[in-house]
Amino acid sequence: MEGIPHPIPRTVEEVFGDFKGRRAGLIKALTTDVEKFYHQCDPEKENLCLYGMPNETWEVNLPVEEVPPELPEPALGINFARDGMQEKDWLSLVAVHSDSWLLAVAFYFGARFGFGKNERKRLFQMINEVPTIFEVVSGNGKQPKDQSDDDESGEDEEEDDEQGATCGACGESYGTDEFWICCDVCERWFHGKCVKITPAKAEHIKQYKCPGCSGKRARV
């Protein structure tokens, strides 16, 4: 929670670094750590919040007691809606609220340290370059392709689709020097290191299911 001391970002680059760290933690909660996150959001408990930390970790906890809080607070009571919705819809709802919270925290720092018009614009542009948490969770976090790609061969289109993808776990863009694996269920791409799959291990997997798909429950 926010009681843990973290360096206070003061420049545009530092605020963006804080944003990326918190974002990575939230994405972990909603993808690779989704089972753990789901069980921690017990509807029988009090109002719970999902916090993303600058060090790329996450935590489900009660809101801070300090009023007003030092930082903007994430959405309250995410646990109450858990059992009343399809899991996919609930995770998407939490993702949308998490995106709003990240923006609130980033621009809180901007206001606190007197960012001018150009600094605020640059911060927003940097934030806008990465997919939202909702886009990552819903599998829509791909960068738009250029229209000229329509004239390329099918093989080139497949390669472009892979290179335009973002990791479903960490949200980072495709890199040719890294091993990636695609989930055969949701068709999202993941860094091998993010889902603990090596090229050697992948050779023995007939159908790969990402952590989110392998942990889905049947709903009554």
Image (spheres, rainbow, N blue to C red):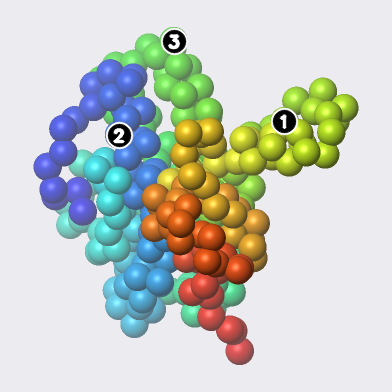
Q: Disc 2 residue type? A: Asp
Q: Nearer the viewer, mark 3 or mark 1?
A: 1
* Image position, residue 18 (x, y; %): 30, 34
Mark 2–mark 3 Cα distance, whole angstroms, equals: 19 Å
Q: Label 1: which residue?
A: 145
Q: Residues within 10 Å of mark 2 (few under 14, many from 20)?
A: many
In the rendered image, the quadrant that contains the C terminus is: bottom right
**Which mark sits nearer the N-terminus, 2 or 1?**
2
Label 1 sits on a secondary structure element that is: loop
Lower sequence index among marks 3 and 1: 3
Disc 2 target residue: 18
Front-most of residues 78 and 59:
59
Instruction: Name the residue that disc number 3 marks.
Output: 118
Density class for disc 1 (Cα within 10 Å; few <14, some 14-19, many ≥20) is few
- Residue drawn at (53%, 60%), measured in percent from left and top? 203
Q: Dot 2: what SS?
A: helix
At label 1, the amino acid type is Lys
Q: Secondary structure at mark 3?
A: helix
The Cα–Cα distance between marks 3 and 1, rounded to whole angstroms, is 28 Å
Q: Residue furthest toward the bottom?
A: 220
x, y percentage for residue 45?
A: 30, 78
Q: Is residue 120 above or below residue 66?
A: above
Q: Nearer the viewer, residue 168 or 93?
A: 168
- The residue shown at (48%, 34%) is 177
Point out residue 212 in the picture as x, y percentages from the top left corner: 50, 66
From what the image shows, is residue 198 above or below residue 109?
below
- Image marks 2 and 3: residues in contact by CB distance under 8 Å: no
Q: Position of residue 192 (x, y in %)?
A: 45, 51
